[in-house]
Image (cartoon, helix red, strand yellow):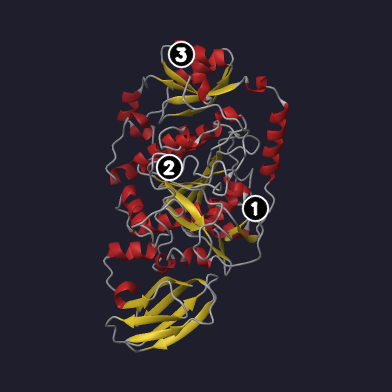
Amino acid sequence: MTIFSIAMKKAILLLWLTLSAAAFAQQDAWVYFTDKPNADTYLANPLTMLSQRSLDRRTAQNIPLDLKDVPVSQDYINTVASQSGVTVYAKSKWLNAVHVRGEIADIQALTQLPFVASVDFADNAIDNGNRPAPNRPAAFQQKFETLADFPYGTSQSQINMLNGQQLHQQDYTGNGKVIAVLDAGFPGVDVLDAFARLRANGHILGGYDFVARSSNFYTSNGHGTAVLSTMGGYVEDQLVGTAPDADYYLFITESNTDENPLEESLWVEAAEEADRLGVDIITTSLGYFHFVNPNYNYNYDDMNGTTAFITRGADIAFSRGIIVVASAGNSGASATDPHIGVPADGINVLAVGAVDADEVRAAFSSLGPSYDGRVKPDVSAQGQQTIIADSNGAIIAANGTSFSGPIIAGMTACLWQVFPDKTNAQIVGLIRQYADRFSSPDTFYGYGIPDFGAAMNSQLGIGNTSKEMFTVYPNPAGGQLYIRNNGTAMPSDLILYNAMGQQVVTLHFETDTTPVNLQQLPKGVYFYSITAGNNVTSGKILKQ
């Protein structure tokens, strides 16, 4: 599949190489304000700032309103916009700031306005900061550049890998939860068969193109279409998303003709709108490390959870009661910058790496930890040969943490549906706790691959889980697997599936310990389902 933004952005890079330094005379900067003059009025009338659903989410999690919820003063914005040589492109109430572009002197002159607290240039050298001047142009390793054609397949492995089918079997499919997708475009979502179920059930609540300032969000780059399909897509026997019954808002924040810090500001603006609308989860498969102007580039030491504008916005979103899921990035094979980008470095952001169907880390998946030593990525899911729907309606396989991220976001919605009274922090904690490397996280997988079924069962107090009714061992297994009956005095049936969802072993057993011959099976990850009476339990094993 061809993504036109690759060619466009490379063309911009070639153009940059032919221009002099004067081409970057127009600088980007954030202008921070001192206060919010009408704060008391807004706080006394919260429905002028936030929807009832947003207020209900706050109440449910005991999160009080504060000054960050109050809009930026429009008088301040108008005054800045009226200054010579300065253009305002975005605003943020959470950070009480606007994103501007202009000549250095004109932007610096804004500090003379009585309500301007400070100015922060995207080029840190102008602020006499510590970020060294980069010596290389932008590499444009966008999250969505790794899409690749692949033959027809099934999406079952990407759900079963997370034991997500257990939630779906109990009718936890994201119903009642709202997900905001912040991406590069959503062409075809309004007409393609893969999204007919979403449309028929009214699950697409709206959206906005923040780049073009347009209400038409069914446009631009098809990357967002593919991302949405991993959660909300439905094509029988081909593709089932992880949250097919969740509600969705679709926001375009990524430009297809430029790579600029303005995209960070648009992302934060969209996240604030998601908060206003009462969204539960934000998922984003965008990330930033390099820009067209290399003076704006980040370094690894900026991946500390507190530096980037977008990262600070993401953490504020979490403080409002929202779960923020971000793809870790696709630069893991880079010799120069293999680490996660922003906002995946956020302290409270659930950053997701990529594995293949055999649960082996994808070589492109960006590495942790954050610069300050926190576990990143947080968890991992299938991002290699992931089954998606593209903007032409084709069901194909594609590569990228762009897809492992929303797969986790969808399952997160399902888990939160099970436990609506839990806070965002508690849900994220469960996801990490029931990942398979929780006791020994690393820089490749983070805490590992979550088991959403186990997380659900543990909180519901279900005693008849596979770990108690049956012991399946050894795991990893060689040529022989054993099922030990832990006191279940009833006939039982085993079905073993491969990563493509095909049944490869079926076995009826009644003995205390039953051998299962795996000699003829190739190496890889397999999923088992054991039925004992009315109890159906499942898990996964690795055949070596």
Q: Position of residue 437 (x, y in %)?
A: 38, 59
At horizontal 41% and vertical 11% (from top left) the residue drawn is: 114
177, above or below 72, in the image: below
Q: Is residue 202 visible?
A: no
Q: Position of residue 268 (x, y in %)?
A: 47, 35
Q: Is residue 214 visible?
A: yes
Q: Amino acid at mark 1?
A: Ser
29, above or below 210, in the image: above
Q: What is the CA distance from the residue labelled 3 to the residue labelled 1?
A: 46 Å
At horizontal 34% and vertical 85% (from top left) the residue drawn is: 513
From the viewer's side, name the closer residue of 286 and 380: 380
From the viewer's side, name the closer residue of 81 and 121: 121
Name the residue tied to disc 1.
391
Q: Which mark is residue 370?
A: 2
165, above or below 63, in the image: below
Name the residue tied to disc 3.
111
From the viewer's side, name the closer residue of 341 and 420: 341
**Nearest to N terminus: mark 3 or mark 1:** 3
At horizontal 46% and vertical 56% (from top left) the residue drawn is: 380
543, above or below 185, in the image: below
* Residue 229 located left or right of residue 1: left
Tags 1 and 2 in contact by the CB under 8 Å rule? no
Label 1: how many residues lie within 10 Å, few (<14), some (14-19) or many (20+)?
A: many
